[in-house]
Image: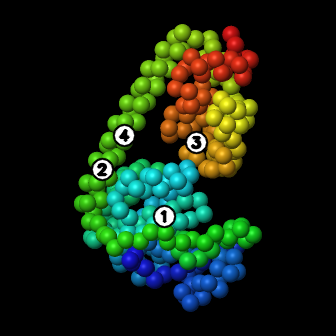
Amino acid sequence: MWIDSGQFYALNDQSKDAMGMFGIPGADAHSWNKKGYGIFWTVNSFDGKRQIVNLTQVNGWVVDMDNGTKQEMLVQIKKGLVPSMVVETKRGYHVYFKAKDGTKENWNLIIKNYLVPFYHSDRNAVDLARVLRRPGFLHMKDPTNPFLIKTVWEHDVQYSEKEMILFYESRIKTAKKAILEKKQTRIDSDKKWRKLYGPFWEQVKKIDCESALNTLSGTEYVQFETYKFSDTGSGKKNIYVNGNSTACWIDQEGLIGSSSGGGPTIAQWLNWFHKDYSKTIQIIKEVFPQCKN
């Protein structure tokens, strides 16, 4: 079983109010939840205010996964150590690992250097005093469609800091090597085709990728995938594929950002499907007449 910090916090899910996040008695949690407040807990234990100086125990390590589809996330979870607990959220999963000997000195090393990159998780949900949604309560940001935060996996297992570091360090190194090799292969291929079609590639680079994806959405060229976009408020737009969030986005210059080789231009996005630049060039010339020359 996970070590419950025993602390409950409430935050208005539907609007920002003057109260902000505040501590509540556990007995009142369901009452606050019914009023539209999300209910949270700390991963670790504190004596007094939720501040690192008041930390009394590192209970474990946790990552907040919300990139990609839930099915993709579950596949990645199975590649790691067996979690102590997995909590399903509206957008993904919180993956917990109980600590045998957790220390605040090694918290950032384990979370930021290993768990976050391995699970492609939220880089902001990493500090020792972070709160996450408590299982057993409703996510109330959309009161017409509340989502129950629930524990979907529990296992009586705990890990030492050494076990965590040894396991994830080796896998991060292997993953980085594979990414670099894949990137170099892509660069070599791009250079080859750019040499053969120099002026053509200059035209491709000028295509606005959001407009291009809208044009390609639902067509055979992208295996009938459909695309929508969500403004992040920071100049980027997240790309949704078939209604699901992904780890891809449109940046401020109208180019595609992708961790899987789907950018930066529409050419790389198309070639991800076809694995053949001659086919990709043919499609671009068919769909985008400004690139025929």
- Alpha carbon separation for disc pair 2 and 3: 25 Å
> On residue 169, which mark appears?
2
Depth check, front residue: 107 or 48: 107
Lower sequence index among marks 3 and 1:
1
- Looking at the rendered structure, the secondary structure element under dot 2 is helix
Q: Position of residue 136 (x, y in %)?
A: 55, 77
Amino acid at circle 4: Lys
For label 3, the residue is 248
Lower sequence index among marks 2 and 4:
2
- Alpha carbon separation for disc pair 4 and 1: 24 Å
For label 4, the residue is 176
User: Which quadrant does the N terminus fall into?
Assistant: bottom left
Amino acid at circle 3: Cys
On the question of residue 68 being in view, the answer is yes
- Alpha carbon separation for disc pair 3 and 4: 19 Å
Q: Position of residue 103 (x, y in %)?
A: 30, 68
